[in-house]
Amino acid sequence: MQLRDKLRILADAAKYDASCSSSGGKKRDSVQTRGIGSNEGMGICHSYTPDGRCVSLLKILLTNQCLYDCAYCINRRSSNVPRAKFTVEEVVKLTLDFYKRNYIEGLFLSSGIIKSHDETMEEMTRVAKSLRQKSAVTLFANPWAKCASASMPAKSATRLSSRPPAKAHK
């Protein structure tokens, strides 16, 4: 699969993660026909620094493949969506290419669970370590990873956020 195709699939898949203040899409609207949390934009999200400055981030998933079948997630195992997975090197190249063109100031990286929580976190940490010297890195902590794995990205990221675990994974 071409890198451009992976980017299209994995940026689109990341837009459903509501943790960024904006995903470049139109206003979310649960009153209209789009449904709860609808968002049409993809690829760039905006975060705000403590001093109020807006920072543009490339918002992608490492993969939309996942072991779990969570009913709320568009990327659940049983979902009939195109699947893709970036290599660590592909994420680093894309991020640096966008960064050098001043499209973004950093990376917002999340992921489906590849083989295990720990393996997924290790791949995300490799991305963070590779980028740390060149750009701001924002990562989701995987709250289900073992403590050692979950703390790894904190050493390389400038901002770290975590989402609470789902009540039940299947």
Image (cartoon, rainbow, N blue to C red):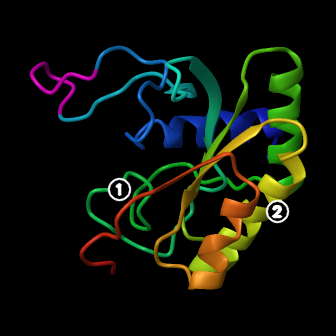
Closest to the observer: 60 or 52?
52
Evaluate whether residue 123 shows in this view. yes
Placement of the C terminus among the 4 image quadrants: bottom left
Q: Are marks 1 and 2 in contact (CB under 8 Å)?
A: no
Q: Secondary structure at mark 2?
A: helix
The image quarter containing residue 79 is bottom left
Q: Is residue 31 magenta?
A: yes
Question: In the rendered image of this protein, does residue 143 appear above or below residue 25?
Answer: below
Q: Nearer the viewer, mark 1 or mark 2?
A: 2
Residue 146, percent from left and from top: 57, 85
Closest to the observer: 40 or 52?
52
**Identity of the amino acid at label 1?**
Cys
Seen at 86% across and 15% down, the residue is 101
Residue 55, percent from left and from top: 61, 22
Seen at 56% across and 49% down, the residue is 82
Find the magenta span and give its range. 28-35
Could you tell which of marks 1 and 2 lies nearer the N-terminus? 1
Label 2 environment density (alpha carbons within 10 Å; few <14, some 14–19, many ≥20) = some
Q: Which residue in the structure is indicated by mark 1?
A: 73
Q: Is residue 74 magenta?
A: no
Q: Which residue in the structure is indicated by mark 2?
A: 126
Judged by its main secondary structure, the magenta piece is loop
Question: In the rendered image of this protein, does residue 94 appear above or below residue 68?
Answer: above
**Identity of the amino acid at label 2?**
Arg
